[in-house]
Amino acid sequence: MSGQSESLPSVEETKQSFHILTGHIRDLAHTPLLTCSETTSIQETAQLMNDHRVSAAVILNANGQVAGIVTDWDLRERVVAAGRDTRQPIHEVMSAPLITIPADAPIYEAVSLMITHNIHHLLITLDQQPLGLVTSHDLIVLHSTSAFFTVREIKRQTTTAGLRAVLDQTQQTIPLLLRQGVHASQIGWLMTDINDHLSMRVLELTEASLGPPPLPYCWLVLGSEGRHEQTFKTDQDNALIYADPPQEAADSSRAYFLEFGRQAVASLVEAGFPPCPGLLTADNALWVQPVSGWQNHFHRWATTWEPEEEPNFLIFFDFRGVYGDLTFPKNLRHYIAKLLDEHPRFLTRLAHLSASLPPPVGFFGQFMVEHNGEHKHEFDLKQRAMVPLVDLARFFALKYHLNETNTLTRLEQVQEASDLSADLVHELAQSFEFLLNLRLQHQWKQIQAGQPPSNYLNPDHLSALERSFLKETFKTLAQAQALLHKMYHLKVGRFY
């Protein structure tokens, strides 16, 4: 799937459009909003839409709650073309349920919802009440090279070279967003959404190459992609789950999905996603499994202690479905929750793994860095700071059976579902945002200097304020780890 890419927007145009899309959706709301009762006739609704010069009306039920929406398309296709009696109530031709978005959501979330659901109108709500409508036309007017068009551009590509060109351009928007004060977590959501659509296009092209799959399946992303925390290009982590086949079709089904995983991962490499050094990708037969195979994986992790697997298997709890039958990952999460209830020692082991790596700061507050070698005077910001915090958020999400994978969202939900100190959870969230931003800024400086981005950081190169924040972050992380040690009576050393 190689070849020439089609014409793309310029880098500067793409940068500008991404900046616009980080604004709030409330800024695009059409008010006042035209609403009609569900008993209003089709003819009267059409007249009101004409009088108010709007392309849609929100339909309310007898209790004044949103029941659906009627658009120009509905009137044309479901009324005029169908020869329907216009004296009938409008609820007969409305579209329901109506997709909504909160007023404080970033504009790029509206783009994603419209594309995902193939709709052209989105209801904006404030405190769960209708505020206004936003249309796909609004996004086109907003900027002709917005992320809406970036995703459309992805869908137009028929080659991995074309997809790589799109990815390279979107990556160049990251420093601009950082300079304009966009939170690193927001950038992670935005870039992950673009990466999701690019992966989906690769999978569509792979299906076209191999032919229709013999069974329903779902493509899973893991690690930072699974947590919506991917920014600059990182190696891919993915897997594949498919329906349990009948016995007579087991071998042929497995052969198809193994080849599917091999081709998809190779195409993602061509599209700009580096291969995984740890082979945690769907070109590894271990991670291409039917439902029962994945259940066996998690059951083994829950009941046997295999230290050599410890560095890797935790990221499988961050799985997220991006393409195919999304009931598979949903049902697998239910299975994991059941395992955790049935095997409490598994939860204790997860607590040990999630609190086993202390932050790199000494008793007297000095940073603990490498003393020799390539990274002398540096420490690994990802492995020694971000990963332990991600591990803590994941552990509490599993403990309280929360299905979210994003670290900040996990912490937000943990605060609501547990009796943990609200201050501690809030400080953990702030710490993660700070670390993610620090890592992004550090890697961008490396790229500017012509160096490959890495996670090793020399604290002496930070400002006094950054060093102070970093020490406070490590202090918060140590407090949370100490809490976990106390809750589960953990001891220093390996857990068997």
Image (cartoon, rainbow, N blue to C red):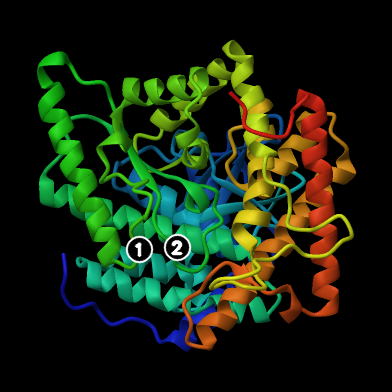
Residue 29, can we see it? no
Whole-percent x and y of residue 243? 28, 25
Q: Would residue 166 appear left or right of 480 to someone viewing this image?
A: left
What's under tag 1, amino acid-wise? Pro
Indicate the position of residue 315 as horizontal and vertical percent values: 50, 42
Query: In what element is the residue under mark 1?
Result: loop
C-alpha separation, residue under disc 2 versus residue under disc 1? 7 Å
Dot 2 falls on a residue whose secondary structure is loop
Question: In the displayed structure, does residue 120 sit left or right of residue 260?
Answer: right
For the image, the number of numbered tags is 2
> Splitting the image into 4 quarters, where does residue 153 fall?
bottom left
Task: Please tell me whether residue 156 is drawn above or below residue 17 in the rendered image.
Answer: above
Quadrant for the C terminus in the image:
top right
* Position of 208 relative to 233 (above/below): above
Q: Give amino acid for label 2.
A: Thr
> Residue 297: image x %, image y %?
40, 25
Q: Position of residue 67 (x, y in %)?
A: 59, 36
Determine crowd level at label 2: few under 14, some 14-19, many 20+ residues with C-alpha closer than 10 A. some
Q: Which residue is mark 2?
A: 234
100 relative to 358 in the view: left or right:
left
Q: Are marks 2 and 1 in contact (CB under 8 Å)?
A: yes
Q: Which mark is residue 403?
A: none
Q: Is residue 354 left or right of residue 313?
A: right
Return the residue nearer the eye: 374 or 333.
374
Identify the residue shown where x is 60% and y is 51%. 123
Mark 1 — residue? 274
Q: Earlier in the sequence, mark 2 or mark 1?
A: 2
Which residue lies at the image location 38% right of the left edge and 83% below the top edge?
9
Dividing the picture into quarters, in which one does residue 218 lie?
A: top left
Residue occupying the far front of the picture? 372
Q: Nearer the viewer, residue 105 or 129?
A: 105
Observer-nearest residue: 484 or 68?
A: 484
